[in-house]
């Protein structure tokens, strides 16, 4: 019986080499998946769309003016009941999120699934007929139409696009003058 058999299993060198190869693969693949995953940007877009839709639904439900604010850097989104008593627009109170009961406001880059998300809009995302420039606020009247109040008059929304970016991916949330929110 001159032949010796080798015990079953792997040598320490083989295990170290396998761990090294897996570690290198993880360093190359994981950052690419996490920074450019378009599905994460879809979740961010859905969060912004949900905020706009909730403001509109509260305006329809209560027959009172409600609004949403989308502020370019730092990418702050909030939903509020509008206070129009002073002739202009003021945030009367931030609404409670329907699921969490917490104030309905968030920073895009603070969402757990959206680290690194940002607004692409160089200026505020909402433009109105007869007003120069754009605004960070959009209001919804009792019929759910989108607009803004200035100088005592209702100015309908002429364009509303919240432009989002995460890594190399981009996504828009579009608001129509009738208050319809879409993710084209």
Image (cartoon, rainbow, N blue to C red):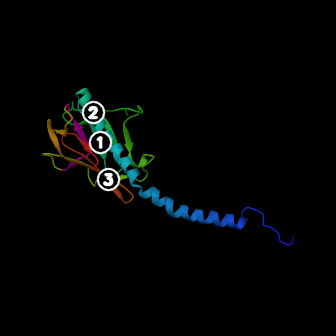
Instruction: Decide which of tag 3 and tag 2 comes sooner along the chain.
Output: 2
Q: In which quarter of the image is residue 66?
A: top left
Q: In which quarter of the image is residue 146?
A: top left
Q: Where is residue 57 in the image (x, y as percent from the top left)?
A: 27, 33
Label 1 close to label 2 by CB (< 8 Å)? no
As drawn, which residue projects farthest toward the right? 1
Q: Can residue 151 be seen in this view?
A: no
Above or below: residue 96 compared with residue 136: above
Mostly what secondary structure, the magenta segment?
strand
Rounded to the nearest angstrom, the CA distance separating label 1 from label 3 is: 18 Å
Q: Which mark is residue 57?
A: 2
55 or 4, which is in the foreground? Answer: 4
Under circle 1, the secondary element is: strand
Q: Which label sits in the foreground, 1 or 2?
A: 2
* Residue 75 counted in the magenta span: no
Whether residue 61 appears in this view of the structure is yes
Tag 3 residue: 171
Measured along the vertical axis of the image, is residue 134 above or below residue 52? Answer: below
Work out which residue is located at the far front of the displayed protein and give it: 1
Crowd rating for badge 3 (residues with CA inside 10 Å; few <14, some 14–19, many 20+)? many
Residue at x 57%, y 65% (from the top left corner) = 24
Label ID, residue 69: 1
Please tell me the numbered disc located at residue 114. Answer: none
Q: In which quarter of the image is the N terminus?
A: bottom right
- Mark 1 or mark 3: which comes first in sequence? 1
Specify which label sits upstream in the sequence, 1 or 2: 2
């Amino acid at each position: 019986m001159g032949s010796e058999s080798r015990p079953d299993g792997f040598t320490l060198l083989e295990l170290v080499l396998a761990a090294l190869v897996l570690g290198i693969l993880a360093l190359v693949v994981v950052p690419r998946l996490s920074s450019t995953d378009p599905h994460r940007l879809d979740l961010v877009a859905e969060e912004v769309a949900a905020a706009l839709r909730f403001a509109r639904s509260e305006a329809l439900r209560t027959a009172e003016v409600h609004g949403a604010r989308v502020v370019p850097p730092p990418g702050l989104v909030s939903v509020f009941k509008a206070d129009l008593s002073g002739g202009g627009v003021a945030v009367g109170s931030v609404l409670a999120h329907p699921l969490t009961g917490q104030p309905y406001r968030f920073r895009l880059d603070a969402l757990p699934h959206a680290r690194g998300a940002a607004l692409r809009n160089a200026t505020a995302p909402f433009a109105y007929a007869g007003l120069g420039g754009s605004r960070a606020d959009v209001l919804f009247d009792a019929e759910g139409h989108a607009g803004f109040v200035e100088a005592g008059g209702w100015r309908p929304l002429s364009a509303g696009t919240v432009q989002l970016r995460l890594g190399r991916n981009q996504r828009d949330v579009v608001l129509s003058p009738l208050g319809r929110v879409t993710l084209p």
